[in-house]
Image (cartoon, rainbow, N blue to C red):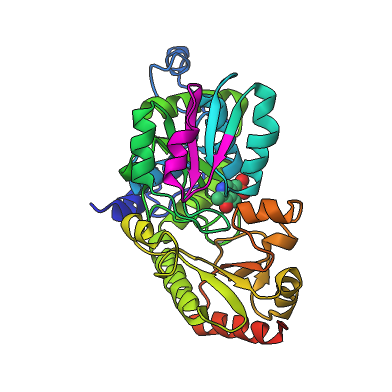
Amino acid sequence: MHPISKAIRTQIDRTNEMEHSQPMFLTSSFCFDNAEEMRAAFADETDDNIYSRFSNPNVQEFVDRMCALEGTEAGFATASGMSAIFASFMTFLKQGDHLLSCRSIFGSTHTVITKYLPKYGISHSYVDAGDMAAWEEAIRPETRMIYVETPTNPALEIIDMETLSSLAKKHGLILVVDNCFATPVIQRPADFGADLVIHSATKWLDGQGRVLGGVVLGKKELIKDVYLFCRSTGPSLSPFNAWLLSKSLETLDVRMERHASNAFYLAQQLEGHARLSLVKYPQLPSHPQYAIAQKQMSNGGGIVCFELKGGIDAGRNFLNALRMLSLSANLGDTRSIASHPASTTHAKLTEAERAAVGISAGLIRISVGLERKEDILQDILQALEKVST
Ligand SMILES: *Cc1c(COP(=O)(O)O)cnc(C)c1O
């Protein structure tokens, strides 16, 4: 079966009720028929459920579906994308280790790397995503892990995963890819050699802006260690959230197809607009890493960025002029969302720090929803009319 069909048909075993849709297992613990079965479960001789901090049928179904989609052996689901990221750092890095990361990176991941990892004696270096020679130069004897997002949030830079994974293999490093922006229906990092694939399930995987969730996926032996760390420290995904997220995966492929075709249309229509200095989308030939995107992505995904002439004020005025698009920090919803990183998520950075991660004063990020493409475009065009240059 195709991975997408396999994911849709992967399901918790039917109960005696013969339900078609999966039931929800809202239970914190599980029972045993006798002392021997209980002993065996605790001794890891069986894989019976013990306690929902360790495992739960709904959570396992979500993980199994993600494994089918990403082409990985195993996974562990967490309460949010950030707990998935933090768990993979804590599982594989120790005092004295060094982490290499792309410079343009999700804000909270940046906070974990620069504020919390140093408390455990873990150092880091940032590398500019597009500069492949710089990655090898930045590797030190104590480097242990390479961590990247591709496309990056919010600058939409694309990193060549195949090249990076051969570098990681040559130096014995763990390559971790945050696949949040693309989702497995657009790119599968494990096919290009990534050791761990991470998701914030909160975004496109849920796709409807309802719940938080995260997942770490990869080879069995690596995930075993993530599981042991998480089962003791407790960032487990709620079975309710897992039930919602698992159901959402059945529509991921059709949703992403429409998000991406809407986004591509928007990018093409907006490119060259008099009030914009730049339109960025992985499928536009003008994108600096267009060739890499063509190689590793099946389409450009659901995020479009553009730069308003007129900087910070133009950004604020643009948001205020929108009628339909939501102003929200989230992305990956059925409804289109606009955000202005320079005045919100990245407001604490200096202009130079923002420039280094590809965020100009007038950068607008659009998470393209499932409304009709003409309606999304019209709202943006009428708002652009009201922004003075
Ligand atoms: C949102 C996001 C995260 C964090 O996920 P949460 O579910 O909000 O904890 C991590 N990486 C990227 C690229 C994101 O967009």
In percent of width and height, residue 222 lies at: 42, 27
| Res 260 seen here | yes
Report x, y in % for residue 353. 68, 50
**Which of 122 and 130 lies nearest the eye of the viewer?**
130
Q: Is residue 286 above or below residue 244?
A: below
Query: What stretch of residues is rendered in magenta?
Result: 125-149
Figure quadrant of residue 174: top left
In depth, the one of 42 and 352 nearer the eye is 352
- The quadrant holding residue 355 is bottom right
Residue sitting at 38 percent across and 61 percent down? 253
Residue 372 visible in the shown view: no
**How many numbered badges does the structure rendering display?**
0
Quadrant occupied by the C terminus: bottom right
Q: Is residue 8 above or below residue 371?
A: above
Is 127 situated left or right of 170 in this image? right
In this view, 223 is above or below 245? above
Q: Is 199 inside the magenta-drawn segment?
A: no
- Residue at the location (51% across, 49% down)? 243
Measured along the vertical axis of the image, is residue 273 above or below residue 39? below
**Position of residue 233 in the picture relative to residue 205 (left or right):** right
Viewer-proximal residue, 238 or 194?
A: 194
**Residue 135: within the magenta?**
yes
Residue drawn at the location 60% of the way across and 19% of the way down: 95
Query: Looking at the picture, how far across and down is residue 365, in whole percent?
Result: 60, 66
- Residue 190 locus on image (x, y percent): 35, 42
